[in-house]
Every structure is written in C-alpha cells, then in structure tokens.
Amino acid sequence: MTTPDTPDTQRPRPGSDILRTALRRNVGAMTWGTVLMGLYQAGETAFPIALGLIVEHTMQDRSLGALGLSIAALAVIITTVSLSWRFGMRILQKANTTEAHRWRVKVAGCGLQPVARDVDLKSGEVLTIATEDADQTADIIEVVPLLVSSLVAVVVAAVALGLADLRLGLLVIVGTVGILSVLSVMSKRIGSSTQEQQARVARAGAKVADLITGLRPLHGFGGNHAAFTSYRGVSTEAKRQAITVARVNGVYAGTALALNAVLAAAVSITAGWLAFEGSITVGELVMAVGLAQFIMEPLKMFSEMPKYVMIARASAERMALVLNAPPVTVPGPGRPAPGGDLELDCVRHGALRKVRFHVAAGEFVAIAPYQPRAAADLAAVLAAKVPPHAYDGAVRISGQELAELSTEAVREHMLVNPYDGEIFAGTLRTNIDPSGTSRTVDEAVEASMLTDVVALHPEGLDYGVRDRGANLSGGQRQRLSLARALAADTDVLVLHDPTTAVDAVTEQLIARNVAKLRRGRTTVVITSSPALLDAADRVLVLDDGVVTAEDTHRNLLATNEEYCLAVAR
C-alpha cells in the first residue's frame, strides 16, 4: 500500500521534530504575528514612556499646543496597541487552529489506514492524542511569537530605564534573567507531570470506551459492578495526577507572580530613591513607576512561556508514539484478479490447526464451527486483521497469496463482515451505503429483511440512527450490518454469524435471499444456523481447528450424528 503520507510516517518523528515541523509550516503567519504582537508590546511600553515625556515637557512649556500634541501622541499609541493586538492574535489563532487540525487528521489517518500500527495504545488513548495533544502541540504557534513580543517589551523597558539611569536598566535585565532561570527549572517538572496526567486521562477514556461497548453483556452476567469499580480506580489515578499538575501549576504561577512583583517593586523603589537623590527628573520618575507597573504583564507572559513549551513538547512526544509506530505488516503491491476463488492451505493460528479448504469462484459455502474461538480466529485471518507472518500456512485469493497483495485491494475485493459490526450515528442509508456509491441498496435491504424497519418510519432509509444503533434492537442492528455487507457487492463476501439475533422465520427468509442475491458471487458464511447451512452449496465442518467433514447440510444431518447434535435447533 502506498499513500501520500507513507514516506513521512515511516521516518521516525520525535516530539521535537513534530514541533519543528509545526513551526516551519507556519513561519509566515508567525512572522506577521510576531511583528504585530511586538508592535503591540512596544506600544504598551511606549505608553508610560510617553506619559513621562509629557509630564517632563508639558510642565515646562505649559501650553495648549504641547498638551494637544501629547493627547494626539497617546491616541496614536492606543490605536496602535488595539489594532496590532486584534490582528496579531487573529493571525496566530488561525494558524494555531489550522495546525491542530493537520495533526488531528494525521493521527486519525494512522488509525484509519488499512494496515494497523503496532502501538501499545487503546482506541480511547489514540482519541485523546488526536484531540487534546494535537491542540496543545499546535499551541507552540502562539507561544513563540508571544515569547518574542514579551522579550521586545522587556528590552524596550530596559533601554528606556537605562537611558534615564543605567542602574535601572541593569536591574530590569538582571531581574528578568534571574526570574527565567528559576522558572525554567520549575517548568521541567510541569512537563513531566503533564505528560503523566495526559497518559492517565487517556487510559481512563479508553476504559470508558470499553465499558460503553460492553455495557449490555456486562449487565447480562452481572459484571457491571466490577467493571465500574475498575473504572473508578483508573479515574481516581487520573484525578490524583490532575491535582498534582494543578498544584505544580499553582506553585509555578504563584512563584512567577511573586518574583515579577518583587522586580516591579525594586524598580519603583530604586527610581524613587534616585529621584530623591536628584539623579533622575520627575518625568523620568513617572516613566519608571509606569514601566514598573506595566512590565508585570510582559514579564508574566514571558515567564509562563516555558511552561507552555514543556506542555507542547509533552503532547508532541505522545503524538510521536502513534506517528512513529511501525505498521503491523508490510503488504505487497499486487491486486487480486476479478471474481476469483478463496483457498486456505494448512493455516495454523490460535485455535486453527492446519485448516485446508478451497471455495471455487461463484460458490456459496457455509462453515460450521463447533468451537466459537476457531470461528473468530478464522474470520480474523480472512479479514487480514492477522498479518501473514503471524500465522503458518497461506491464504490465497484468485491463486495469489495474501502476503503478496495490497491490504487495501484485498478489502475492496473481499469483505469480511463481523458478527458485531459497528453501527454509526447517521441514517439507515448512510449506514448501509457510507460512500453513497452502491447500486444495490434496495436489493440489500430486501435481502437482509430490513424492509420492516424501513417501513416503520415515515423517513424510510433516511430514518435517524443514534450512535452504536442505540435506538435499534439487536436484531435490527444485525440486519442493518448485513445489509451494509450485501450492498458493498464485493467479489468475495465472508459473513460471520449474520443471523444470531433474529427469529427463525426471518432467518429462513434471509438465508434464501442471501443465496439468491449472491448467486454467481463467491460467498462464505461462518455459522451454525440450519437455515444458512441448508442454503449453501456445501458445508465444511470445522472441529478442533481442522476441517473434519464436507457435504451438503442435509447429507450431513443424515450421516453425521455429531453434526446433527451441533446444528439442530
């Protein structure tokens, strides 16, 4: 299989590389954002400087012209501050949102590829990575420009104070360096704590997804209490780690605020002392006090940036777990020939022991498994969920081994419909024909006996279906899944227990309809249903992992007592 992302996803992408890629892709937006945000910070810094100059010169001239010029200068500064902030943040937030979308799509694409990745994460954890971690990684797009603009403000303030008195400028520079040194050490703790919190929240999310999927069976055998207790333990761990992260963040924010306040107080006190000595003028004192108060904001922003950098890096490292994971198997480039037959040659996997059979092109064959585990393992092998190197023997489609074929091409040619096919939120139509290209939707609905469900609702096939088919019965969900498989109209169709949730009369009708609709197309049904077994051209008995008998259903009933006991209802 080759996709546009193949070369990129095969190369290792550590978290730092992901961050560099995000920065490189948005260099234009970040440049403009940095210029505008730098202009904003420079304007903010210019405000107390202008006030100091106004006090200095207006008090000397005492003229209406000087006052009007001062008011006009302040208006220009305020307008610059307002517009630069508005457009700068608009540019940065648009780039941030777009970059987060790109990484969400990339992580989701890894999960949707035909070949699964060898990653030790559950689907709930991957979902968290594709949402929260992608968003936090993209925050680096805003962090860097804000960091630079804050630095601009600190530098402008230091230069302005240094021009008034060198000691004031040095105090700002030394104080800023000291604050950042202390906070950079604390930010490392935040990064490691946040990474652990994200992992625990993701595990809790995965546990919730598992519980929702298995809620009905859990209620059936009374295991819901134990399952909820298990989830409560995982959720408690996530809560404790979240409290730890909040505590660390609180200490960090409190320390930053305290250090910034100390620096601002030091600048104000020093400026007052210098003014008392006569080293600076009253206007310079007003400027120094104003800058001491203003500098709190850029210093706070500047001091918070290391924390956000560490959070972005931790999220990028988690995304790298998915993006770096190698594929479970490397499929071949071939495509199966149209039509075609299906052959298993001494396949050994799980409960299967040297399974050997051949289904000719256009034949309808039923496989009667005596052990459910063997049926599940057989369906997994045929669905290419098990890579060819993970089992002994060979699976051949149209005479070509599965390992030589593209997984995507195999799934276009052969559909294996599981007994627990997922139902999606949408409509009956979108569940039956997700791509909107099938020409056999009506025939599939009729063959699967879904017609009564369609007739129940005025909307017909446009009737709304809730997530996981919550507003459908078990039999309706199963028939909807069967209709989707039939509407795909693939050359080879494998059905695994397609009628376990329907009544006997409906099962008889479905068996006849499927045989009629699939006439001339290769069809394999893994089932113990007498109706489907009777509709098949022949039946293969799968016992203890091997094919032990082969004949028509009625002949097997007459000659094989074990088969009769296994399938008779």
Image (cartoon, grey):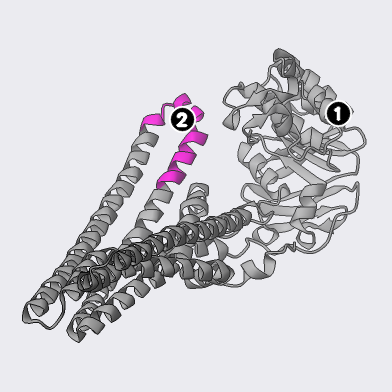
Identify the residue position indicated by label 1 in the image: 515
Mark 1: few/some/many CA within 10 Å (<14, 14-19, 20+): some
**Towards the viewer: 159 or 487:** 159
Q: Is residue 76 above or below residue 216?
A: below
Q: Are marks 2 and 1 in contact (CB under 8 Å)?
A: no
Name the residue tied to disc 2.
218
Say which of 207 and 133 sits in front: 133
Q: Residue at x 31, y 74 (%)?
A: 154
Instruction: Give the x, y percent position of residue 162.
Output: 24, 83
* Amino acid type of the residue tagged 1 in the rendering: Ala
Element under disc 2: helix
Secondary element at tag 1: helix
Q: Quadrant of the N terminus?
A: bottom right
- Give the quarter of the image for residue 568: top right
**As drawn, is 165 to the left or to the right of 553?**
left
Q: Residue 535 at x, y = what percent? A: 84, 26
Residue 221 rendering spot, x and y as whole percentages: 45, 26
Structural distance between the alpha carbons of marks 2 and 1? 35 Å
Span shown in magenta: 204-225
Image coords of residue 509 (percent x, y): 80, 19
How many labels, in total? 2
Image quadrant in which you'd find residue 481:
top right
Q: Is residue 147 left or right of residue 529?
A: left
Could you tell whether 477 is left or right of 259 in the image?
Answer: right
Q: Identify the residue at image location x=39%, y=49%.
A: 201
Q: Residue furthest bottom?
A: 166
What residue is at 20 percent from the left and 60 percent from the top? Answer: 254
Q: Is residue 259 magenta?
A: no
Residue positioned 10% across, 73% down in the render = 272
Q: Nearer the viewer, residue 232 or 160?
A: 160
Q: Which mark is residue 38?
A: none
